[in-house]
Structures are given as structure tokens and as C-alpha cells.
Amino acid sequence: MAGDRVTRPGHIQIGDGLLLGPGTPYGWRTLTGWEESPGLDSGTVNRSDAHGGFPGRLLAQPRTITVEGLVVRTEPGLMEAAVRDLAAATALRDDEQPLVVQLDAAPPLMCYARCIRRAVPVEAGGYAVGVAVGGALQFEATDPRRYAVVEQTVETRLPQPEPGLDWHLAPGPEHLAWPLEFGTPGSTGTMTAVNSGDAPAHPLIAFRGPVELPSLTNITTGEAIEYDIALGDGDVLVVDTSAGTVTLNGSASRLHTVTARSTPEQLVTLGPGASMLAFRAAPWSMDPRAGCTVTWRSAYW
């Protein structure tokens, strides 16, 4: 599990296994690219008839993270095994894996990255005594944002009316029985998602049937997604706003069911702070079993 071995300041976990930092064979001195702003592509266009320009959109480039001053220290005779473990954790791969970093007493942050360069110096006698000094690891994260390790989830049902006040009318002479019961509160169909970071976060949205024409609207921004589909009992429609995919029951694509009023999936984000979300459906679709779940991680630049 991502970050499950990170327990103290100075720890860096690569993928689900290898840990760098205090209490491990791997020490490090500096971490560059972690707190720096990523490179930017600017859409700003210079004015042709005046000073300055027209401000355009700024898009972040991939983040490059370098662990410098890497030291591998083991008992004599165990250096080769430690280097092999490091090589296996940083081997060339096509997919990205979690890179979790804890710098102080604050909760750790993570990004998804892959190692693009590894250097472990080999000096005469170093392996024999169990010391290699001056190494480095370089990672590239195609998504430059850093995320909270712990996912957050909120869910709601379709709006449901409240049952109202039960007057407890007893047989015989009418009288009231105390305390009065107002019944189980109805559902408002709304929920609040809080992104504690400073960057937009892409949520994972799941609609659960039975429901027709499910939609989710971000009341804070006005963005909405809606799908012209009828979900049966047990059906789940998952919208991955990061990947821009819409799948039914884990496999079948239903991207073609998107309606004209929908925002493109990859533009649906949770901005920093609180976002009020409303789950709705067709007017005749009111089954109380229908639900919507939103899962996300707070995101940081």
C-alpha cells in the first residue's frame, strides 16, 4: 500500500516496497524538484499594437524529482543485496508508481512517478566495507501535482422527502403521546467535498442504480456531468475524471451516453476548498436505493 512504511520525517517510499531514509540502508541529503513549482507552458500572446500581451492559460509540465547525496550503507558483504533491491525498485517501467515523501511532522504527500535515472557510485573497497557515497535517483511525474496519501469519500442518495411528524394518536379519546417523532430525515441529494490542497483535484465519481439519467452538479462552479442511461439495481457507472473514462460495471465503456449539458469529464475538478455537489436524476427516478459516491485526494502544487 502506498506510504504504509512511511512513519517519520526523512522517509521516502518508492512504490509499495522500498523505503529510503532513517532506519534503512539508504540515506539521502537533498530532494530537488519536490517543493519547486513545475515548469509551465504559457498561452500568453504578445500584443501587436501595444506593450505587454494577452494573458493565456498556464499549464504545468511534468515534475522532475531528484534524490541527491544518496548513501548506501550495510554490513560488510550485504552491499550487493542492498543495491539489487534499490535497482529492482527503480527499474525501467512503462507505468508510474506512488512516490511518498514525509519531510517533517506533517502528513506525507505523494505523486505518481517512475525512475528515469539511477546512479550508485562504485569505489575500490567501498562494497567490501559496505559503503557507497554520492549516488542519486531521478524521477519523472507526468502529473505534477502532489496528493494526500489518504483518500476521502462522500456519498449521498437521491433527494427524498421527510416522512413528517407522527402525532401518536392513540385509540379512544384523542391525545398526543410524547415525545413526538419526526421520523427519519429525508435525503437532500447534496454533499460537500473538501480539497485541503492548493491545486485542483480530479475526483472518481460512481453512480449506483437503480436510477435513470444520473447527474452530478458542482453547485460551487456550475460544472455538471449527466448520462442518458438507465442503471438497474446493482449497476455501477464509474466516471474517472482524470482519465476521462466512463465505464459500466468495471468494463463496458458508456462514454457515448453523455448528454449535451455535460462538462467534458477531464475538466471536472474539485478546486481548493469546499465544493457543494448535487446528485440528481430524471424526475420519475426516485428509488431510495440509488446513490452517488465521490472519491478524491487533496491535491497540492
Image (tube, rainbow, N blue to C red):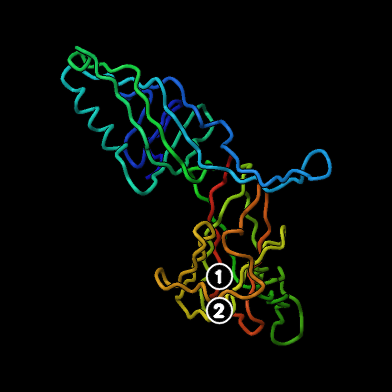
Give how far across and how far down residue 68 sits, in percent.
Answer: 41, 23
- Taking the spot 33% from the left edge, 24% from the top edge, the residue there is 26
In the image, residue 167 sits, relative to residue 137, either above or below, namely below
The quadrant in which the N terminus is found is top left
At 53% from the left and 49% from the top, the residue drawn is 297
Q: Is residue 60 above or below residue 72?
A: below
**Badge 2, how many Cα within 10 Å: few under 14, some, many 20+?**
many
- Secondary element under disc 2, as helix, strand or loop, is strand
Quadrant location of residue 262? bottom right
Secondary structure found at label 1: strand
* Three-letter code, disc 2: Val
Residue situated in front as seen by the camera: 107 or 72: 72
Measured from the top left, where is residue 187 in percent x and y?
A: 65, 69
| Relative depth, front residue between 33 and 275 | 33
Q: Residue furthest front?
A: 49
**Residue located at (52% from left, 56% from top):** 242
Q: Is residue 97 left or right of residue 122?
A: right
Give the side of residue 109 with respect to residue 199, left or right: left
Q: Which residue is mark 1?
A: 291
The residue at which mark 2 appears reads as 211
Left or right of 128? Residue 216 is right
Residue 66 picture location, percent across and down: 44, 29
Mark pair 1, 2: CA separation: 8 Å
Residue 16 x, y percent position in the rendering: 34, 42
- Count up the numbered dots: 2
Residue 284, image quadrant: bottom right
- Residue extending farthest right: 50
| Mark 1 neighbour density, 10 Å: few (under 14) some (14–19) many (20 or more) | many
Q: Residue at coordinates 50% horizontally, 79% vertically from top-left?
A: 231
Between 79 and 292, the one lying in front of the other is 79
For marks 1 and 2, the one nearer the N-term is 2
The amino acid sitting under disc 1 is Gly
